[in-house]
Amino acid sequence: MKLYPDKLDAHLRQSLAPVYLLHGDEPLQLMEIGDKLRNKGREAGFDERQVIVATEDADWASFREAADSFSLFAERRLIELRLPTGKPGRIGGEVLKQYCMDPPPDVLLLITSGKLDRNGGNSAWFKAIDKAGVTLAVWPIPASQLGNWLNQRLTAKGLHADAAALSLIAERIEGNLLAARQEVERLALLYPPGPLSSEQVLIAVSDSARYSIADLSLAALQGESVRALRILTGLHEEAVSEVLVLWSLVNEIRAGARSAEAVEAGVSEDAALKSAGVWANRMAPLKLALGRHSALSWLSMLSTCTTIDRQIKGQAAGSCWDSLAALTTELAGNGAPLLRKNPGIPA
């Protein structure tokens, strides 16, 4: 069965499945959920632990041997199978399907995987695990929920942060939950239990924000221009390829242009977005952007993308990062292009 992270504790109080698959690209949550399952396994008598990293076909022979062998030191064993790429391959997929048909009663299998693509989530091996045990997807915590997440962590340490303090911490560690946990631990060491002000946070917390390219396009679509520019600055400082940044924005702008033209022709927004190939989780942000931009505005931004592409290739004058900042601001706004240089992003 599929399980959400916030339902794991209730599940573990009732039962322990023979197989667990954790998949995603958020390391702190993967680590903490894995620790919960390991602790529960030890409580249930799965004392011996074996770790197998499956990166090639020979590793699957090792896994099969481990699953079929009897333990010399404990009656019950925990086998951790790690899939760094999230793709077990043909051989690995078949091994997992066969294993899940009749899981050994003396083995608890914990599989951790990188983020699965659509094919992985629809594969036969994934469905076999979902039928025999539990699959649990781990997603990054959205910026809108980060304040609540931090508040829970701080409260557990006896610290009560005001709204300004939570906002300041969230801004400085957004997208980096490992850094967030470290900052919570640091604040608990520096200050006694009780109220926590933004001034105290400013003194103690370092700027550890980490952003992804997807964060940029989402913030721009939602009209969050200040946050979008901050993300763009972070991507530049992390030496993220300008080609990838442009690619992300172009995909959204192209979908917006197609949808806007269809809407202006009389098609409903939902039908226009679906026809443009927009995924369900991107429809709401794109609807917000459609409310701000006409079809002409979208086409103008597409033209700007062409200029930026030429700048990246050295075929047009100007800084591509300045142009990306202007494009980001235009997308986050109402279509009025920003021509001045953005001081937050160096050339």
Image: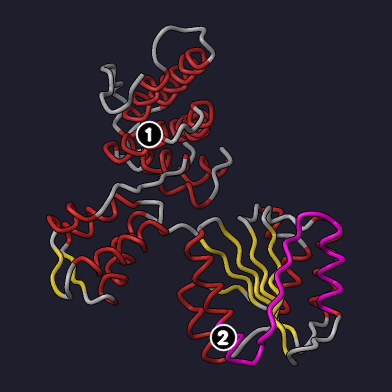
Query: Residue 177 magenta-drawn?
Result: no
Contact check, label 2 and label 1, Cβ < 8 Å: no
Q: Residues within 10 Å of mark 1 (few under 14, many from 20)?
A: many
**Dot label at residue 40:** 2
Q: Amino acid at mark 1?
A: Leu
- Secondary structure beneath label 1: helix
Q: Percent from the top left, x then y, of residue 121?
A: 68, 60
Q: Which residues are magenta?
A: 39-67
Residue appearing at x 22%, y 60% in the figure: 166
Q: Nearer the viewer, residue 177 or 75?
A: 75
Image location of residue 299, percent across then percent down: 45, 22
Residue 319 vs residue 137: left or right? left
The residue pinned by badge 1 equals 232
At 62% from the left edge and 92% from the top edge, which residue is drawn? 44
- Residue 49 is inside the magenta segment: yes
- In the image, 289 versus 188, the foreground residue is 188
Examine the image and state in which quarter residue 48 appears. Answer: bottom right
Res. 197 in view? yes
Given residues 284 and 61, the one toward you in this image is: 61
Q: How is the image coloured?
A: secondary structure
Q: Is residue 185 left or right of residue 196?
A: right
Q: Position of residue 241 (x, y in %)?
A: 51, 29
Q: Is residue 342 above or below residue 210?
A: above
The quadrant where residue 114 appears: bottom right
Q: Amino acid at mark 2?
A: Lys
Percent from the top left, x then y, of residue 21?
Answer: 65, 70
Could you tell whether 160 is left or right of 20 in the image? left
Task: Give the class, few, some or many, for how many residues have Cα within 10 Å of label 2's Cα (few <14, many ≥20).
Answer: some
